Amino acid sequence: MKAQEIAACWQAMDLPPPWTPAEGAAPGVLAVRSPIDGEVFGQLAMCDAALANARIARAHAAQTTWALTPAPARGEVVRRFGEALRANKDALGRLVSLESGKILQEGLGEVQEMIDICDFAVGLSRQLHGLTIASERPAHAMRETWHPYGLCGVISAFNFPVAVWAWNAALALVCGNGVVWKPSEKTPLCALAAQGLLDRVFERHAPQFDGLSCVLTGGRQLGEHLVQHPAVRLMSATGSTRMGREVGMACAAHFKRAILELGGNNAAIVTPSAELEMTIRAMTFAAAGTAGQRCTTLRRAFVHADLIETVTNRLRQVFARLPVGDPLEDGTLVGPLIDHAAGDTMANALASCRAQGNVVHGGERLLGDRYPHACYVRPALVLTDAQHDTMLTETFAPILYLMPYTSLDEAIALNNAASHGLSSCIFTESLREAERFLSSAGSDCGIANVNIGTSGAEIGGAFGGEKATGGGRESGSDAWKGYMRRATNTINYGDALPLAQGIRFDV
């Protein structure tokens, strides 16, 4: 039972634990558990519609004055939040590992990602630049200005229980918006802890904006309520393509803006010139990191026919000795799947592969005697000669498909055949191959890498993908524009009224 360790994290952050002891299944509550042992130790009251409406109304009221606060002053609040995260990195990072099941290094890395986006947003708060535009009319000037968009809703997934919210919240706040967060019902404690740290910053440094950011704990119906609420003008949703499609359609019906960061079925191309040892290391982390539960997880690998046997043998050796177990123990590299349902989905996918004649290595359940309520698996390799439906369906688990190719054109076509378009990579020492892969004739993904894997995005680059991945962009580049509205201004500083396009309208 991980209850004491989770409680210790909350104590280290000087936050009151929000859960009560578990009393069996009950309506209106969320079970609190760690996927490390799978045992339920507490419960949280779910946010009902009335409470959600009250919190949304309070955030909306605070946002009306926050929007009028100078952007650098907004950035100062975000800077202080970054400092709070630095002071509590160890405790929050450990909590992330305990509640999501990722190894401790990844939990700490996720909090570092929150710190990094705060740093990025602070600088951005002094760079919300518009353009000066040449006018065709004499004695006229044109410019564009940027304004806060309004209240932003955020739906996040269990696999990155705090970082994805921070990507959105840090940018949304410096852009002058409020934030209402519906986290995954599988990781509510991480959300409440992160929000608790932000609340403390507002209490100490900007108490007049109390309630500007808040958390709604609950399931799917609560997410639907958030999307439909008229005060919420923008929805940023991270999760499955199915969920994103529903969010996108609901937003369209109400003319709301949607930022969608959905699933991925990411691929690597291994060319004859690839530096193999680096390639194997990169592929292993990309495929097995976070137990294969990243949207950027490497799921498909197209290996040149001359190398397929060598790469397969090396990956089999590496996968077979990957340390699987308690993610908080030293040396563990692969923690548990989030729950048994995820393990069943993985098992069904592997069974489908075997039925199609594919060779499967690994994928077996582990540690069942030690953790009967948790789900640990050996990362799996699937050898196939053709890209089939199972391979083209995202399975949120550590399954890596290996397939040979003979020409780069063939490999690029295989990469682009997936319905998703999130992340991709090529391993090559050829400048020509690398540039071809990065060109408009290459990968159709939002992320295209050379000699690194598909996962491990950095703050500063816009994160997101195309097609069934949703088309949204978060965290870097000019993603901030998604959280603001643009106005074009024309100023006539002369004493005449020339019209555009040379139109004459004399009265």
Image (cartoon, rainbow, N blue to C red):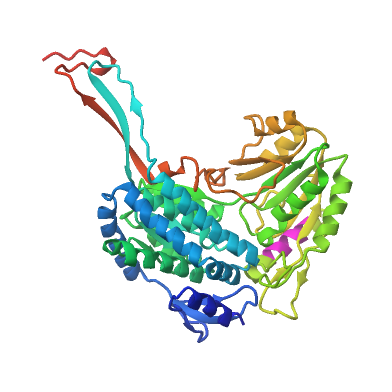
- Please name the residue shown 56% across and 44% down the image: 465
| Above-or-below relation of 437 to 30 | above
Q: Is residue 56 left or right of residue 265?
A: left
Residue 307: where, in percent of width, then height?
86, 42
Is 204 left or right of 348, judged from the image as shown? left
User: Which sits in the foreground, 407 or 428?
Assistant: 428
Residue 91: x %, y % from top left? 54, 71
Q: Taking the image as drawn, is residue 260 in sight?
A: yes
Q: Residue at x 37, y 40 (%)?
A: 128
Main SS category, magenta section? helix
Q: Considering only vertical position in the picture, is 495 above or below 421?
A: above
Where, by quadrant of the figure, is residue 159 drawn? bottom right
Residue 363 in the magenta stretch? The answer is: no
Q: Horizontally, is 215 left or right of 139 in the view?
A: right
Question: Percent from the top left, x then y, of residue 477?
Answer: 49, 41
| Quadrant containing the C terminus in the rendered view | top left
Q: Is residue 176 visible?
A: no
Task: Tell me the quarter of the picture where residue 146 sits.
Answer: top left
Magenta extent: 344-353
The residue furthest left is 507
Q: Compared to 21, does 29 lie above or below? A: above
